[in-house]
Image: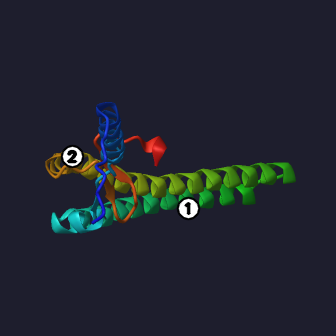
Amino acid sequence: MAERKRLRIQPADLLYLVALVCLVAGVFLAARRSKVGVVDFAKVAAEVGFEEQLALNSVRWRNEAAAKSQELVAEFQETRIALQEEMASAGTEDEKTEFQVDLAARQRRLEGSLRQISREIVEQGQQQVMEFRKRLSPIIADIARKKRMDIVVDSSSSSMLYCNGKVDMTAA
């Protein structure tokens, strides 16, 4: 029978091998992937009645805007009729031109006011969504901490709703 040779490992070599295994294991353990949670903000909004409230407010805002717009247009129409009557009685072409310039300036102001009303409707909707997200934020953060999530994103907009602060976004 062939004689087996026993392999003898020196203590220093064994210590080196153990340190190398620990180093490799440490690298793998330290390179933990971030745990990401996904929230369907639209679904949450629908479930708590936010979408319905936003729709109701939107209808109210549009009705208020329509009333205000109609009021502005009616005022403009009255002014336009008065200016046209004055323009008809104007003696010179310069006076007529002056009335036309005045009427055009008033029309531009009306159009600017109508655009502003439209912007305000959009801003009101955006403000309400931001307030809802702000109220929802501590709840999402609490759930994320309990579930040991590093990041939570909204599935519909891909916006970040929570980050635990330990995630290095520059390494992504």
- Please report the residue visible at 34 percent of the width from the left and 40 percent of the height from the top: 17
81 vs 100, left or right, is left
- Mark number displayed over residue 161: none
Q: Secondary structure at mark 2?
A: helix
Quadrant including the N terminus: bottom left
Gap in Å between the C-alphas at discs 1 and 2? Answer: 54 Å
Residue at the extreme left of the image, as rendered: 146
Quick one: 25 or 119, which is closer to the camera?
A: 25
Q: In the rendered image, which residue does mark 1 sit on?
A: 77
From the top left corner, tell me how far across and down residue 135 is, in percent. Answer: 21, 47
Foreground mark, 1 or 2, reads: 2
| Amino acid bearing label 2 | Ala
From the top left corner, tell me how far across and down residue 41 is, in percent. Answer: 28, 62
Q: Label 1: how many residues lie within 10 Å, few (<14), some (14-19) or many (20+)?
A: few
Q: Quadrant of residue 66?
A: bottom left
Q: Label 2: how many residues lie within 10 Å, few (<14), some (14-19) or many (20+)?
A: some
Label 1–label 2 contact, CB within 8 A? no
123 vs 25, left or right, is right
From the top left corner, tell me how far across and down residue 55 is, in percent. Answer: 28, 67
24 vs 40, left or right, is right
Quick one: 31 or 153, which is closer to the camera?
A: 31
- Mark number displayed over residue 141: 2
From the top left corner, tell me how far across and down residue 26 is, in percent. Answer: 32, 41
- Please report the residue visible at 47 percent of the width from the left and 44 percent of the height from the top: 171
Quick one: 65 or 118, which is closer to the camera?
A: 118
